[in-house]
Amino acid sequence: MRQYLDLCQRIVDEGVWVDNQRTGKRCLTVINADLTYDVGNNQFPLVTTRKSFWRSAIAEILGYLRGYDNAADFRQLGTKTWDANANDNAAWLANPRRKGEDDMGLIYGALGRAFPKPEGGSVDLLRQIIDDLSKGIDNRGEILTFYHPGAFELGCLRPCMYSHHFSLLGDTLYLNSTQRSCDVPLGLNFNMVQVYVLLALVAQITGHKAGQAYHKIVNAHIYEDQLAPMRDIQLTRTPYTSPKLIINPKIQSLEDIETWVTLDDFAVEDYQHHDPIKYPFSV
């Protein structure tokens, strides 16, 4: 929590106002932030200075791992986070490649599970990584990427957290995740959970111990209509001790994640939090 609050305070104190063309709003912005999560010791990075809806964040990362490209599938898992970008994004609604209601296009997991090859066909990047790590192989390039500049027009949104690089040292698995852009009051709360869960899950299904997850944010910002509640409410609160995440030990393979895993397979213990804060969301 301390590193999260330090970043929020840094943006308030040092941020520069930038006009955002997509949303039509100004953002108070800083460049480069690095956060670290101790997954091996189960220090779950859940925000405690307001209530965090962690179940929705986990549902979203499960949808990415399954390669979902439709907001309805995400809703069935337990999150409505893609409803607005799939159905209320003016640029996407006007895109002739949009297939219809709830279609998200080739983004995030849909791309990572079927990354196009120049000669045709595709590569399942996640399957390749899981197969390597399960055999104890690390080729220094175990990278799950959702970023393909040649395919931006095929999806409703460029990916924000776009790269997850797994590294194996002995029997301990590490993760470096890179995020090009972060809505800190709303998005970072989700992203912290997802980086942690991704390392915890992949370590569990490949038979390794989880180490640390390193989360780099390039452009960290607070939208102008989020500034007052961040500065005047959330930053005045005292954080609580980090809770713990419990993952069903029966999850043993990528096929398990693809087929039967639900939010009921995750639980959070000892989560103390302050009251919720309703931050505006920018489409």
Image: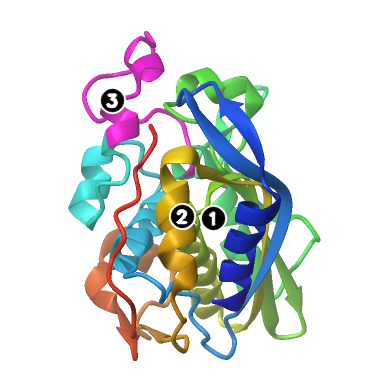
Residue 86 lies within the magenta run: yes
- In this orientation, does residue 121 appear? yes
Marks 1 and 3 sit apart, C-alpha to C-alpha, by 32 Å
Tell me the mark number nearer the camera, choosing from 1 and 3: 3
Q: Which residue is drawn at 60% across and 54% down?
A: 12
Question: Most prominent secondary structure in the magenta stretch?
Answer: loop
Q: How crowded is mark 2: few (under 14 residues within 10 Å), some or many (20 or more)?
A: many
Q: Are marks 1 and 3 in contact (CB under 8 Å)?
A: no
Indicate the secondary structure of the residue bearing disc 2.
loop
Type of the residue with mark 3: Asp
* Quadrant containing the N terminus in the rendered view: bottom right
From this viewpoint, is residue 190 visible? no
Quadrant position of the C terminus in the picture: top left
Q: Image check: 121 left or right of 228?
A: right
Where, by quadrant of the figure, is residue 84 drawn?
top left
Q: How far apart are marks 3 and 2 (CA)?
A: 21 Å
Residue 8, position as x, y percentages in the image: 58, 60
In this figure, which residue is indicated by the disc labeled 3? 88
Estimate the spatial distance between the alpha carbons at disc 2 and disc 1, rounded to whole Å.
33 Å
Residue 192, above or below 74: below
Name the disc covering residue 185, or none.
2
- Please tell me how crowded label 1 is: few (under 14), some (14-19), or many (20+) other residues with Cα within 10 Å: some
Looking at marks 2 and 1 on the same chain, the residue that comes earlier in the sequence is marked by 1
Which contiguous range is marked in magenta?
Answer: 84-108
Q: Mark 1 points at which residue?
A: 127
Position of residue 274 measured from the top left corner of the image (x, y, whole percent): 32, 76
Q: Which amino acid does the dot numbered 2 rest on?
A: Pro
Nearest the eye: 192 or 274: 274
Left or right: residue 146 versus residue 279 is right
Q: Name the residue rendered at 33%, 85% in the picture.
A: 272
- N-term mark: 1 or 3: 3
